[in-house]
Image (cartoon, rainbow, N blue to C red):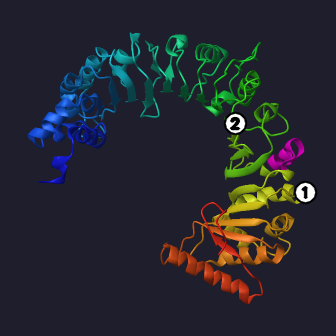
Amino acid sequence: MSPISIIPDTLLSDIMLESASFDMAFALGLAAVSARWRAVALGSRRLWARFRLESSWDIRALPIFLARSEPVPLHIKLHFARNDYSLTTASTAEERAQAVGLLAHCTGRIRCLNVRRGAEPLFDALLATGLHFDILDELVHDYNISFGDFAPVSLSAPQLTRLRLDRVMSDRWDQILGHHLTALSISRQYEPFIDTQLLRAIFLGCPKLQELLLHEDTILSEHSDVQMPAFTSRIPAPALRRLDIQSHIDNVATILAGLSEVFIPSIFISFYDGDFDGHPLMYDLMRGISPLVSITVEDDQSALLVDAVGIERRILLENYDSPYWDYSALWAYLVRHHNAQSSVHTIRCAAGHILELTPAICEWPPSSEPPFKFQIRLDDTFRQAIHDGDFDGDGYYAHVFLSCPPQSRFCLEGLWSDHSAVRHMLRLIKSTQDVVVCFNEVQEAGGTDEGSKFQLLRVLQMEMFDQGQHCQWTLCTDCVSSTH
């Protein structure tokens, strides 16, 4: 007797449900294994209530799934393969229209609906004709092409809690945005859409909203003559925990000012161009935040600020005129307005961004407790800095390391097989500071197993010892493990 034969039917049903994972062909295959499996599969209505429509074959099987799942709530993914993508699985326009027509008669059973659409308007029969979805809990609408008209949306879903819409238009936001909504994401390219009417519909109609994402094209919004007027009263958003806004810098400032009486733990703002000192949005962005403890320079144009209790502020500056942010100005602003030099104990950045931070850090060196930590990602810019002499005694890197407080900790991420850059970094650090050097994500041409990593680091340690420098190192993933 095989082990699978002694599994209880309830457990076998759960295994089938997890294994099928919206795959209609797989579900039908499970029902064809044996008489027992067929009986278990047919008795599990949830197995037939979760499906993804992609191919012509899936559409032909749709009536079977609708019948076998009744009356269980449906979880549906509409990801049709188009004719020009796959000659073997693509469906015809008539077949897709037939499937949408069948689903339009089942709106009372649909709980989750994920739509990935092209330019054709066949989904309008389901999403743009004012249909009522009694139990719809989550709706996702994505465009799988980068061009075409905006999709109209007009429906009623009083139980909707999660909504994500990409490139849609609607004249009745108050009808779509329900009282139970907790997560909302609306994004649109090529045309600004964020206005006072939409925001009032969101915040007045969705008192339980916890997450809000609004993204519009920052370049177009920057050159738009129509800017959002200031709110005459504060925006009510008692449950809001995460805010993500991409728009014109003045629109972002207007929204933050309107939410000034709401404390939001996580805020992500994105706008085209701008500065730190010359715009009031920085005041509203940082309102209520406790002393900062870490700054992460994520790429050339974004930074993540985190305070002592985990509150996050992420800033993305889409400055297409210059490839780099002025991170020195960011540090200067945080020092002047938030006393960052006495509270920040971690700065994470790529090696190249140290050059951007150097002028301000030299003027306002960090002095926080616990010991200050630089978490540095070694990259091609780092190699170029070695070639340009930035590791010499009067080079930029030397200045920034000399300005760091005693007992600073440096975490080096990304080592190469030649190790020459790492040797330069170690020599500079040990010549200026008594520090613990942490190696993270160690890579070597001969292998990446733990033994190879420790062997590599011992070689580096011996080299430093031969130079009269006792290099204390740690192999870690979070820079807080014990030293070896």
Q: Which residue lies at the image location 83% right of the left edge and 48% below the top edge?
A: 329
In this view, the residue farthest toward the left is 35
**What stretch of residues is rendered in magenta?**
329-340
The amino acid type, in three-letter code, at marker 1 is Glu
- Within 10 angstroms of label 1, few (less than 14), some, or many (20 or more) residues? few
Q: Is residue 141 above or below residue 324?
A: above
- Mark 1: which secondary structure? helix
Q: Nearer the viewer, mark 1 or mark 2?
A: 1
In which quadrant of the rendered view does residue 287 lie? top right
Q: Which residue is mark 1?
A: 363
Relative to 137, residue 414 above or below = below
Under circle 2, the secondary element is: loop
Question: Is 294 displayed left or right of 84 in the figure?
Answer: right
* Residue closer to the observer: 54 or 234: 234
**Residue 278 location, x and y as percent?**
85, 35
**403 shown above or below 123:** below
Counting from the top left corner in percent of width and height, residue 466 is at: 72, 89
Image quadrant occupied by the N terminus: bottom left
The residue lying at 44 percent from left, 30 percent from top is 142
Quadrant occupied by the C terminus? bottom right
Check residue 272 in the rendering and tell me which mark sits there, or answer none. 2
Amino acid type at image mark 2: Tyr
Task: Give whichever of 131, 382 is nearer the camera.
Answer: 131
Of the numbered discs 1 and 2, the one sitting upstream in the chain is: 2
Residue at (29% x, 32% y) in the render: 51
Residue 131 visible within the image:
yes
Res 418 visible: no
